Amino acid sequence: FSKKVAEQFKVPFAYNTVSGQNPIMNFTRHGNFALHFNARKLAEYLKEVALFRGVRHVDGKLAEVIGEPDVTCLKLENGTEVDCDFVFDCSGFARLLIGKHFNTEWESYKDHLPLDTGVPFFIPHDNTNLPPQTESIAMKYGWIWKIPVKDRYGCGYVFDSSYINEKEALAHLKLPNFISETASDYVFH
């Protein structure tokens, strides 16, 4: 059912008005679904909510971690010290806490997951006939994700760098059967 509905550029919901109920709840679900958000806009919104609720926002670069085994303070390059009870390491491949402070070794899955490089990019759309699902597009050396959000498609090409490099991957994105937009319509980040 969900596949047939998606092929018609629809989602598996039916609107039904229930008096006294929150309007966002006035939908009956008729199939499975997932939601995609513009991550930057969602982060901005969540920051606004957090600040409104009294959360302190500190922006800076990590210089030193204090506490072993529990992190108790983060010193920033600008001299600010941030006392903490619990820390999430969201530094990605930089691994500032997990790798550099706690010296946890990187565990590679290269033998099982050979796709090791990704090139994210945006593609504009005209807000017509947007598919209500993520597209996964097979490519010669990997695959591409194409996710429709309100103002654009969020895309990325994931590939095996032992076969092609980033420059060659970008050239693959300009293949005639992939996307009809011209190269100037791509926004790489």
Image (spheres, rainbow, N blue to C red):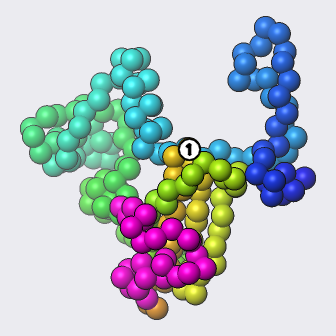
The residue drawn where x is 50% and y is 56% is: 124
**Residue 76 versus residue 113 in the image, above or below:** above
Quadrant of the frame with the C terminus: bottom left
Callout 1 environment at 10 Å: few (<14), some (14 to 19), or many (20+)?
few
| The magenta segment | 164-189
- Identify the amino acid type marked 1: Lys
**Residue 24 versus residue 108 in the image, above or below:** above
The answer to whether any part of residue 170 appears in the image is yes
Residue in front for this viewpoint, 44 or 11: 11
- Residue picked out by circle 1: 150
Q: Position of residue 31 (x, y in %)?
A: 85, 45
The residue drawn where x is 82% and y is 43% is: 12
Q: Is residue 175 magenta?
A: yes
Q: Position of residue 151 (x, y in %)?
A: 51, 46
SS at circle 1: loop
Residue at the far top: name it: 20
